[in-house]
Image (cartoon, rainbow, N blue to C red):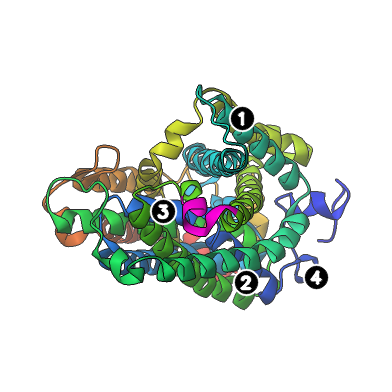
Amino acid sequence: MGKNEHGGKNEFLTGNLPLLKQDRIYSFFDNVNVDVALAIATWCFMTGGTVALFVGLWEAIIATIAGNVIGVFIGIVATSITSAKYGVEHWTLGRSWLGGNGMKLMLLVILLTQVGWAVTLSVMCGRAFENILAATTGFVSESGYLINVLGLVAAVAAWLIAWKGPVAMRKMSGIVAPLMCIVMIGMAILIARAPGGWGAVFDYEAIAPVSGGKMVNFMIAFEINIGAGVSWWASRGTAARLCKTVRAAYWPSMLGVCLASSLGTILGVATSLAFNSIDPTEWMVPLGGMVMGIIALLFIAFANLSSTPVTIYVSSLGLRQFKIFENMNWGKVTFFFMLPTFLVMIFCPLYIYDHFYILMGIICVVYVPLVAIQMVDYFILRKQKLDLVDMFDKTEGSRYRFWGGFNWVAIVVFALSCIVYVALFDPILLAAKPLFVYMSATGATFVFAVLSYTILGKLFLVKNKKGIGGYSNDLSQK
């Protein structure tokens, strides 16, 4: 489709029109850089610190690898393959399985979780600079106002980078990926050289386990890692759209994200246990000394200034689904997404940061059923065939119009699936029911959503005599 009338490559890449292969900017290696830079950015250290609340290192290794593999796999399969094939981000593709209005409804919930990510990363960047200031000058803000200022500055800086678009983000990822690899290798070496080495870390107990026994705590750690893994669903569809081939979209995400994020999370667990702190910005100076610690903190700050723009880019493309933002200047769209983040950074920046496990739990509740429904709709009900013309047709004649723009079958299954999850595990109160230990809330929710939507979809959509959703004619589409 080439560059559209809005002008410039940036405006084209920040719109929601399909990208032809010649318009896509990510090669296999580019996507490896982007995925590794994101996966080993400091959110995996945050995940590791949170996991350390509940389990020791041996259990964390198992929960981290298993949770990431499962979460990343279902998230990537659901979105990357389709987005890379059609050159369309997953928010627009969501019209095929939720309806246009249904996608907007879900976006309101999803964007709240993305604001949570933006706040978390901005606070961490601010905390990194705060700790650098404390280490070099001894200054500590008694009132705590400094984190508001530094976090807000970090959020504004990330917004300005996102304003530049995915080309600038690709360049930053090429720098951040090797820097964060150096940080991880350095952390592993320093832990090995500390008194007792890695053997001592394996002997540490969890920082603040909940009541109910080791198995309950292990399953909570497992759920947190699934949440971290499946959260990639929100960003990989937009990245896959920029990839030149399906292979370049799928394998870097599967291998890079799983491997890099698992290693980063495990290192985060080990360091949290060693220093009895879940905040990554508090580890670096005690672990590496003044000079190395400050360098590591600078790397962390820079990594967050690379990761946060990706969250902004992904979410701002989602805002394009709403008519008011559809043709708005990209800088304004990104500003409106970041406005809640700016407000949180001014008034209460630490609440989400200090309750990171709640964000992971909410992501599981929301994303797992959405991923399950999307997979069933595309791979089972539609046989991997979509019609792009109808995808962008917002009139009543579109095959993806469903009932007034809502696929009520998907929405009902989603609502029931959320109830199933919360019935087994309350991610806010960390209250687990007995069945949670044996099947996990994610496992039960995913299976329930897959079975329910397969059965109800075939009954009310595929066999619908009025052709609701266009399922009966999809096999003829190219």
Q: How many marks?
A: 4
Q: How many neighbours does mark 2 have within 10 angstroms: few (below 14), some (14-19), or many (20 or more)? A: many
C-alpha distance separating marks 4 and 1 = 37 Å
Mark 4 belongs to which amino acid? Gln
C-alpha distance separating marks 1 and 2 = 31 Å
- Please tell me whether mark 3 or mark 2 is closer to you in this view: 3
Camera-nearest residue between 267 and 21? 267
Residue 200: x and y, percent?
29, 66
| 371 versus 7 height, above or below | below
Q: How many neighbours does mark 3 have within 10 angstroms: few (below 14), some (14-19), or many (20 or more)? A: many
Q: Secondary structure at mark 2?
A: helix
Ranked by sequence position, the earlier of labels 4 and 3 is 4
Q: Which residue is mark 4?
A: 22
| 200 versus 400 height, above or below | below
C-alpha distance separating marks 1 and 3 = 23 Å
Residue 442: x and y, percent?
29, 56
Q: Which residue shows up at 53% across the image and 70% down it?
A: 185
- Please tell me whether mark 4 or mark 2 is closer to you in this view: 2
**Picture disc at residue 342:** 1
Q: How many neighbours does mark 4 have within 10 angstroms: few (below 14), some (14-19), or many (20 or more)? A: few
Residue 186: x and y, percent?
53, 67
Q: Which residue shows up at 25% across the image and 37% down it?
A: 429
Ranked by sequence position, the earlier of labels 3 and 2 is 2
Magenta span: helix, strand or loop, mainly? helix
Ranked by sequence position, the earlier of labels 4 and 1 is 4
Residue 206: x and y, percent?
25, 54
Q: Is residue 453 left or right of residue 402?
A: left
Q: Which residue is mark 3?
A: 47
Q: Which residues are magenta?
A: 283-290
**Residue 180 lies in what quarter of the image?**
bottom right
